[in-house]
């Protein structure tokens, strides 16, 4: 299965609570922090919900 690297690039201040919880579920807390995940439908759906706050690249 392919991997993706998700990096938080914007703050979650003044964003809805669901988006904040999605970022936490992805493992992102600080701006500039990166995590690797498999590109399962669950992960891709979470990334799609916060696409304006993160950057994604394939590994």
Image (cartoon, grey):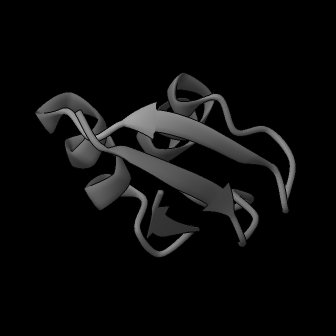
The x, y position of residue 10, in whole percent, is 72, 71
Screen quadrant of the N terminus = top left
Q: In which quarter of the image is residue 29?
A: top right
The x, y position of residue 30, in whole percent, is 86, 48
Give the tally of numbered discs.
Answer: 0
* Towards the viewer: 3 or 8: 3
* Towards the viewer: 2 or 8: 2
* Towards the viewer: 32 or 15: 32
The x, y position of residue 26, in whole percent, is 53, 32
- Toward the left, the furthest residue is 41
Which residue is at a point 69% across and 39% down the rendered structure image?
A: 28
* Towards the viewer: 51 or 39: 39
Which residue is at a point 47% across and 75% down the rendered structure image?
A: 52
Q: In which quarter of the image is residue 13?
A: bottom right
Q: In this view, does 45 lie to the left or right of 55?
A: left
Identify whether 29 is placed above or below 14: above
Which residue is at a point 69% across and 59% down the rendered structure image?
A: 8
Which residue is at a point 55% across and 53% down the rendered structure image?
A: 5
């Amino acid at each position: 299965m392919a991997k993706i690297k998700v990096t938080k690039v914007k703050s979650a201040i003044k964003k809805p609570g669901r988006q904040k919880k999605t970022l936490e579920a992805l493992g992102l807390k600080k701006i500039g922090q990166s995590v690797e995940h498999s590109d399962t439908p669950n992960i891709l759906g979470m990334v799609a919900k916060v696409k304006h706050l993160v950057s994604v690249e394939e590994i």
